[in-house]
Image (cartoon, rainbow, N blue to C red):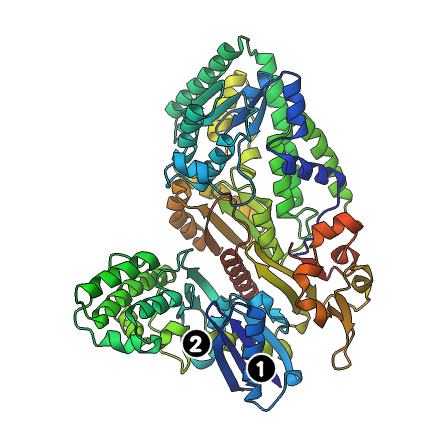
């Protein structure tokens, strides 16, 4: 059985492929401006290494910031659940997780099965996240993957007054002008960020079995600072960045092995722009492939497909998926013109529009 | 949750009122007849007195979306909550220009500063603010009773009329009727499958602030009848309660329900706390009955002791069989923010998880809100297994 998980983060797209009880392939790529394209690229690269093809993958679960916009995923699960589930595969003893991503930080508590018990996330401010470190590395003219080691060389960390991305940048520059070493600046920032993480962790209670996931967990300087603050050494996965995608793949495997009925699967199609996210959800467990949506839609975006000789189901046609923003005006608008639309016409109540 | 909208004609009417607000047809007809419309700002303002004076009270709110607050930011310091800034933005840009008066309660700083600025910068014939005590003691009661009397006489002086007990009793009856019907509407939400969703309930409540209570009562009666015959049923993977700062945005609740939860009740000044207790005229003067009801009503987070509020919340959690609580707090909403650790602890004691969201007034389903809510729902689901 081959299943996959895909994690579309704000900065990186990760994909993991599992065959039975083994991770057979993983891939990390950038999330470009078009998250649909990035998700395809990440998935295809991960599959390529396995010698299988997309058709062999039985079930795909998407997670991360772009999770609703993965056209080939059967379902999406929040990254919080996925990180807890993913780390449980490597370290079932872990109870506290700090996920440090591109745009946010989360502290998660989980139980022995990898179920989330409690979680907190940083607020709107992205100070002290992956993107912030990237920007500081750029300002200091240091390679991002060397910033951690460089910070470890410091023996005189500078105290920062702020981790506001804008102010920290100018503060860092002014220190450099006064001849402060780059390593001391980086160590100072790590110090400030780790304080913020500690506050998050305290809200969910830190236990000795603790881990850091996400891209920043690869930054040795940051990990050192955080373990110093927390008082425990974290157990780190071999690649902490793929834990979210791994969790998603494990959820996908659950669906196939019937731990949770596969009937829950929902397919989402959509797009996002400055005004928000727009997506159509088709609940595959409810859909009986009757074709009412195909007939009612004035823009012809639906089609019926049959997979592996199963019952026919509705989906959005390949051609319409990339042009959904132009083709579908949303449930309210469509209602006004026709007095009826796909979600009203569907007798099984399987279709839902978010706008 | 299934979010197919309830296609009931009366519900659509409520929705139309909300869409047109602040300038609804009913309000413009009232103004054309030369009658007066007052705006009120806080649930500690006794609406019955305004109603008894023959004036339509409408609740001042912002739009159900995050607004550009350019003008408001120029007048109000940044640490005033986005609710007060949203209202002021609408006031200063003339969207409430039909108001003949503004009445507020000195409950929180947000409401208080908003009132000060409204009086100062927006041309308004009548304005009044009631001092609201924070306790439930007998001295607090006599202070608030005096405030209510003062408000009535100030209104009488302005209108050059007399508000007699008969008028007050009539208003009490009309308002109690609305409270009773809203309670009935909430009773429907105790079922496993509810005929009305949380976001739709919010539309009904919003309409209740914006219509004459007589007309609202009539329509709500029809809606209750329609709902009792409706085949449309809403069901969610988890039964949720929403609490926290002032929030009257159906879109926010819809974004929660779109993710599979069902909002079955709430602890908000725009909903439960608005209708929960009736005025009991039992051997006391109508005015005293009003003052008692408003001070003893389901309390706001600013009131002490907080246990009064917490006990009511726990009771609702039992009655509506709530699986999880979503707290949404507007930045700088101090009373609710300070109460959060306490209520979190109380809920932990009874095994109810709470998700706390930092929001701005008018926020709906932003990406960050959705991620948190989805994870919370997944967590609740895992607990059930």
The reply to whether residue A77 is visible in this rendering is: no
Return the x and y of residue A178 as percentages of the image width and height: 17, 63
Q: Residue at x 37, y 45 (%)?
A: B338
Q: Which mark is residue A55?
A: none
Q: Which of the chains bears the disc numbered 2?
A: A
Of the residues under marks 1 and 2, which one precedes in the sequence? 1
The disc at residue A241 is 2
Q: Tell me, yes or no, whether dots 1 and 2 are on the same chain.
A: yes
Quarter holding the C terminus of chain A? bottom right
Residue A315 position, x and y percent, is: 73, 69
Q: Which of the 4 image quarters holds residue B33?
A: top right
Q: Secondary structure at mark 2?
A: helix
Check disc 1 and report the residue beneath it.
Answer: A44
Residue A71 on image: x %, y %: 63, 71
Q: Categorize mark 1 by other alpha carbons within 10 Å: few (<14), some (14-19), many (20+).
A: some
Asked where in the image residue B20 lies, by quadrant, the reply is: top right
Could you say whether the residue bearing mark 1 is in a helix, strand or loop? Answer: helix
Residue in the foreground of this view, choosing between B312 and B376? B376
Q: Chain of mark 1?
A: A
Q: In the figure, A123 relative to B45: above or below?
A: below
Callout 2: 10 Å neighbours few (<14), some, many (20+)? many
Relative side of A319 to B370, left or right: right
x 50%, y 15%: residue = B155
Q: Residue at x 28, y 67 (%)?
A: A190
Marks 1 and 2: which is nearer the front?
1
Asked if residue A121 is positioned above or below residue A240 in the image, the reply reads above
């Amino acid at each position: 059985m081959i299943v996959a998980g895909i994690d579309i983060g704000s900065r990186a797209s990760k994909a993991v492929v599992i065959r039975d009880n083994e991770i057979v392939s993983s891939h990390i790529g950038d999330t470009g401006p078009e998250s649909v394209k990035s998700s395809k690229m990440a998935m295809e690269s991960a599959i390529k290494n396995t010698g299988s093809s997309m058709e062999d993958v039985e079930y795909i679960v998407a997670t991360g910031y772009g999770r609703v916009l993965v056209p080939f995923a059967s379902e999406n699960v929040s990254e919080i659940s996925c990180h807890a589930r993913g780390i449980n595969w490597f370290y079932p003893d872990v109870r506290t997780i700090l996920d440090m991503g591109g745009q946010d930080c989360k502290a998660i508590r989980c139980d022995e099965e990898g179920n989330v018990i409690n979680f907190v996330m940083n607020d709107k401010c992205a100070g002290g996240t992956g993107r912030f470190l990237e920007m500081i590395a750029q300002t200091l003219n240091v390679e991002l993957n060397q910033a951690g080691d460089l910070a470890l060389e410091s023996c005189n960390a500078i105290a920062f007054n702020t981790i506001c991305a804008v102010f920290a940048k100018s503060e860092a520059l002014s220190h450099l002008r006064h001849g402060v070493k780059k390593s001391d600046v980086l160590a100072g920032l790590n110090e400030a960020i780790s304080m913020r993480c500690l506050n998050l962790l305290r809200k969910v209670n830190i236990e000795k079995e603790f881990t850091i996931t996400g891209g920043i967990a690869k930054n040795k300087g940051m990990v050192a600072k955080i373990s110093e603050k927390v008082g425990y050494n974290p157990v780190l996965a071999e690649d902490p960045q793929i834990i979210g995608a791994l969790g998603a793949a494990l959820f996908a495997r659950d669906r196939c092995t019937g731990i949770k009925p596969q009937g829950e699967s929902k397919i989402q199609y959509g797009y996002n722009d400055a005004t928000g996210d727009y997506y159509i959800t088709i609940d595959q467990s409810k859909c009986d492939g009757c074709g009412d949506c195909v007939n009612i839609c004035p823009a012809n975006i639906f089609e019926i497909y049959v997979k592996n000789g199963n019952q026919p189901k509705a989906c959005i046609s390949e051609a319409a998926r990339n042009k959904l923003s132009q083709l579908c005006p949303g449930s309210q608008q469509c209602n006004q013109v026709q007095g009826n639309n796909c979600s009203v016409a569907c007798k099984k109540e399987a279709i839902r529009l978010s706008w | 949750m299934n979010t197919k909208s309830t296609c009931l004609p009366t519900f659509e009417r409520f929705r139309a009122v909300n869409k047109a607000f602040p300038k609804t047809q009913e309000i413009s007809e009232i103004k054309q007849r030369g009658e007066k419309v007052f705006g009120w700002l806080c649930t500690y303002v006794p609406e019955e007195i305004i109603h008894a004076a023959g004036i339509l009270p409408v609740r001042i709110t912002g739009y159900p979306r995050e607004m550009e607050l350019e003008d408001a930011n120029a007048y109000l310091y940044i640490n005033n909550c986005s609710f007060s800034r949203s209202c002021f933005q609408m006031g200063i840009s003339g969207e409430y220009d039909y108001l003949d008066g503004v009445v507020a309660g000195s409950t929180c700083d947000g409401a208080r500063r908003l009132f000060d600025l409204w009086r100062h910068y927006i041309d308004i014939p009548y304005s009044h603010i009631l001092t609201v005590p924070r306790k439930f003691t007998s001295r607090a009661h006599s202070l608030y009773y005096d405030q209510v009397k003062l408000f009535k006489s100030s209104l009488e002086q302005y209108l050059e009329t007399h508000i007699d007990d008969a008028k007050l009793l009539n208003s009490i009856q009309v308002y109690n009727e609305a409270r009773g019907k809203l309670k009935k509407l909430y009773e429907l939400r105790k079922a496993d499958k509810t005929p009305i969703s949380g976001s739709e309930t919010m539309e009904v409540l919003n309409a209740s602030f914006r219509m004459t209570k007589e007309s609202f009562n009539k329509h709500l009666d029809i809606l209750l009848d329609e709902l009792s015959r409706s085949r449309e049923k809403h069901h969610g993977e988890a039964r949720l309660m929403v609490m926290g700062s002032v929030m009257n945005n159906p879109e926010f609740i819809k974004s929660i329900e779109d993710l599979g939860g069902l909002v079955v009740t709430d602890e908000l000044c725009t909903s439960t706390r608005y209708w929960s207790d009736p005025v009991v005229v039992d051997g006391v003067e109508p005015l005293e009955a009003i003052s008692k009801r408003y001070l003893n009503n389901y309390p706001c987070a600013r009131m002490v002791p907080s246990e009064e509020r917490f006990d009511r919340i726990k009771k609702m959690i039992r009655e509506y069989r709530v699986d999880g609580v979503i707290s949404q707090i507007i930045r700088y909403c101090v009373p609710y923010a300070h109460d959060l650790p306490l209520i979190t602890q109380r809920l932990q004691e009874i095994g109810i998880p709470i998700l706390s969201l930092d929001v701005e007034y008018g926020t709906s389903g932003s990406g960050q809100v959705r991620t948190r809510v989805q994870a919370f729902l997944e967590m609740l689901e895992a607990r059930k297994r």
